[in-house]
Image (spheres, rainbow, N blue to C red):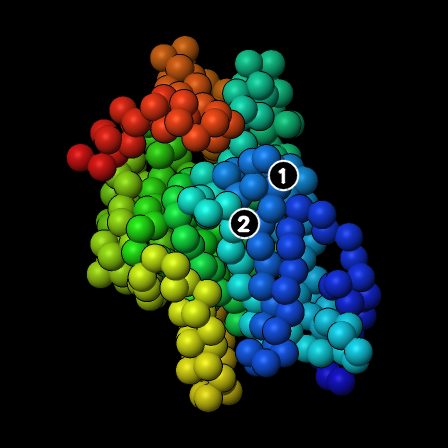
Amino acid sequence: MGAFDFKFPPLDQIAHPHVDFRFDTKAANTLWVSMNSGPEAGRHFSLPLLHDLRAVGQALQAGASHWDGGGLEAVNYAVMLSAHPEYFSLGGDLRLFRSCITSGDRDGLRNYSRLCLEVMHAWGARANPELTTVSLVQGRALGGGFEAALAADYLIAEEQSSFGFPEIMFGLFPCTGAMSLLLRRVPVCQAQRMMTSGKVYSAPELHQMGLVDEVCAQGDGVAAVERYIARHVRQRAARLSVRRAMERMSPLDLAELLQVVDDWVDLALALTPSELRVMDMLIHMQYGTEAPCRQAAAPLLQLAAD
């Protein structure tokens, strides 16, 4: 079998209750991984959802990229999307952050942030040279959600989607690889502005900047992914070689990423009461019902859009 011999049970034989799987052999062996975290499905990265995403990503990268459907099939393409109709992900669990900050729980903050980093690294690493990852964004992708989308080899967004790093509004910064991921696509000065402005960007804006690879009409996202895979598979060997060259030129430095997490934890524990009040407004967006959370977060989102 080679360097990536099958070593683990097929992915459909492992319990991952917070993600839904669909394996399509007709579309060049594509595994669709849909984030589903109960009532908050796709709205933010809960701890159970993060554990499932890390396990699936690491299994794919380690060579367990097979599906048992009457016979073992290699997964050539893995697509991450959300089960929520309006959100890809609103990022880290701000309620958990708030609790850890209030109690001074440094280990809790660090462990959660490192888990987020491990998820990004599992989906953004290139350990399996035969696997291509795709992010499909069909709504809001903020903070860690934006980082997760950027980790894939190819990012497709429906035209109504929006992206941003709102952390600066409450005195923090994105800590799960944002700078490293942005620098693969844009100059460092532009990456810095995006991380510190709090601006919310539309999918067409990011496509023009080179951060989103493809924009499609609302509701056309799944078909757009299928069209991309059909194009990719025709020159798959050459495209994978180009990706390996890019990875050699711009590898993800895990030591640097871990240092950023430690810096973030120090800053989080020093947030002021006024900064925490701003965080509370965004917590409503992650946990509230649709209408109240939109009303609570509207002033911040409008400020970010201006």
Residue 298: image quadrant is top left
Q: Within 10 Å of the Cα at label 1, are there few (<14), some (14-19), or many (20+) other Cα atoms?
A: some
Residue at coordinates 34% horizontally, 50% vertically from top-left?
161
Asked if residue 138 is positioned above or below residue 76 in the image, the reply reads above
Q: Secondary structure at mark 1?
A: helix
Amino acid type indicated by mark 1: Gly
In this rendering, position of residue 80 left or right of residue 278: right
For the N terminus, give its image quadrant. Answer: bottom right
Q: Nearer the viewer, residue 238 or 216?
A: 216
Residue 10: image quadrant is bottom right
Residue bearing mark 2: 83
For the C terminus, give its image quadrant. Answer: top left
Asked if residue 156 is positioned above or below residue 243 in the image, the reply reads above
Where's residue 231, x and y in %? Answer: 42, 82
Q: Nearer the viewer, residue 160 or 208?
A: 160
Residue bearing mark 1: 38
